[in-house]
Every structure is written in C-alpha cells, then in structure tokens.
Image: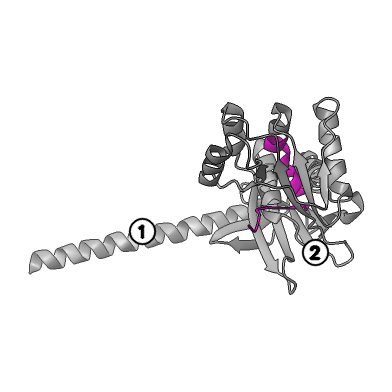
Amino acid sequence: MFAKLQNKIFLLKVLTVAVMILIAGNIIAYLTEASDGHKRPTINFSSRQVTVGVDEDDLAEYAPLDTLIDSLMIGEFDIQPGWIRNDRVQLDNVMYMRKIVQIPKYFPSTLFNLDLTKLANKLDWEILSVNEKIGRQAGAADFSIDVGKDGVIYERMDMVVSPRIRPSGKEVFFIVNGFGFEFDDNVKSFLELPETFSVYVPKDQPAFKVISFEAERLAKPVIKNLPWRNIYYLDEKGDERELIYEFFELLNNIPNRGFVVLSNKPHIYELIKKQFSRVTKKGYIIRSYSERW
C-alpha cells in the first residue's frame, strides 16, 4: 500500500514538472516575439499557427513567384490580365501581397491548385491553406489560397467567380480513327492512354472484335459510325508547335458542343498525352462519346 502511494506521488511530481516546463517555454516564446519588433496578426489553420505579413525586404524575395503565378494563370488557364489585381497590404510594420482574380464559372480549381503547388514547391515556397466557398449556382465556387513559408503568409489569393465573365464549359468529344486492320502495338498504346476519348473502328474491319474487347477492358468506348454533325478534323500540318496551335485554334472555333476527330499517328499520341490536361485547364469539358445502339 505504501509503495503504491509512493508511485502516485512520483507520477504527480513528474506531471507537475512537465507542466511547468511547458508554461516556461510559452513565456519565453512570447517574450522573444514581443522583443523582435514585429507584431503580426495570427490565424490558426488546422491547429497550426500561421502568421500574416513580413517586412519589405522579405516580401521582395517573394515577388518573382508572384510574377510566375500570373504567367501560370494567363498561359495555362486563360485568365485575362485584366482579371488579375495585385496589391500590397500594409499592416502595422509588416506587409503582404494580395491578389484578387476574377474567374469564370466551372474554373478547374483542383488542377490550378495542383499546378500552383508544384510551382511553389519548386521554388521552396508552400501552400499554407486553401479555403473554398461554394456558390449558389452549380459549378461556381470562390476560394482563397495562402502562399508563404515557415508558417508565414507572404501572399493571399482570392479567386472570385465573376458573373461578368462568360462561363467556360464547351463540351468536346474526341474520337481517334484509323483503327481496325490489325491489333498491334500502336493500337495498344492509344488504348492504354488514361485520357478520355473514343476510338472509331468500322465493324467490317478484321480486328474489330479484338480491338473492341481490349478497348472495353481499358474503358475506351468503341464506335462503329462517326457522328453526322458538328464534326471537326484537326489539320495536321507543320511541326509540333504548329500542331498545338492548330489544335487549340480548332477548339476555340467549335460551337458549345462538338466532335473532334484525330488520327492514330505518333504525333497525335503525343498531343493527347501532353495537351489534354491543358484542354481541361482552359475550361473545356471533355466528354466520353459512345453509340446508343
């Protein structure tokens, strides 16, 4: 009985010492922060203490990333320069950058966040938080992003859905043709692509059955007949740069819903592999097309 009492007393002493150490640590941290002359507002994101604002010299180090973010928006996501507003917000004796961006309805926010995170990490910055606010209309969502490092926000970005911007969202159905004579490595390479498109194989072609079987296994719709309206063929001329230009020019000129037919050539394979993600970033909606009968 006496031994158990001694153990309880010992544990109580250990806990008391631990609490005193924790309190002392917080007091030291508070005094250190108060003495450095930088008073910053703090925000708690997921139990993580985040500080807003830095001095002017530190903010200057962030400026190149801010420029690259604007380039990402304009070049990859078709955000117009006039839709981006950049300001500096002055607090007591620190400041941070504020970016307000008008975005259209159905803006691909997930793809943008992935690209922004990749860009920031490449230059040793980080995304500190992403907060989304669902709008009243389907497909519309405002969201904010805090960018910085070491728990300090250097820039706050507010992405605001604007009713003045024409909603993106053209529906595009991609079809790759030229298949059916044989089931070879070229056919396999196209079917194994993860991107969304259909393959056109006439029913009278000798490899129709085997291609249809493999395509179904890999979730690629096989069509036996091409649609009879709103069909557009890519003009495959010039080098890779010219092909990409023609590709996006074609998408820009099709109506709100169209079918784009591509050949089963190696350069088209590379186009699908490299550019389909950019199609989505630019606001087009890629749909899967299959025949009803």
Q: Is residue 236 left or right of residue 22?
A: right
Which quarter of the figure is the N terminus placed in? bottom left
Residue 35: x and y in percent read 65, 53
In the displayed orientation, state which residue is furthest to the left.
1
Q: Which residues are magenta?
A: 271-293
Work out whether residue 183 or residue 189 is closer to the camera in this orientation and state it: 183
| Amino acid type at mark 2 | Val
User: For the point 86% across and 67% down, which residue is it?
Assistant: 163
Which quarter of the figure is the C terminus placed in? bottom right
Residue 125 at least partly seen = no
| Amino acid type at mark 1 | Ala
Which residue in the structure is indicated by mark 2? 161
In the displayed orientation, state which residue is furthest to the right.
82
Helix, strand or loop at disc 2?
A: strand
In the displayed orientation, state which residue is furthest to the front.
204
- Residue 289 covered by magenta stretch: yes
User: For the point 56% across and 47% down, which residue is it?
Assistant: 219
Q: Is residue 83 left or right of residue 26?
A: right
- Residue 138 covered by magenta stretch: no
Residue 105: x and y in percent read 79, 63
User: For the point 52% across and 59% down, which residue is it?
Assistant: 27
Which residue in the structure is indicated by mark 1? 18
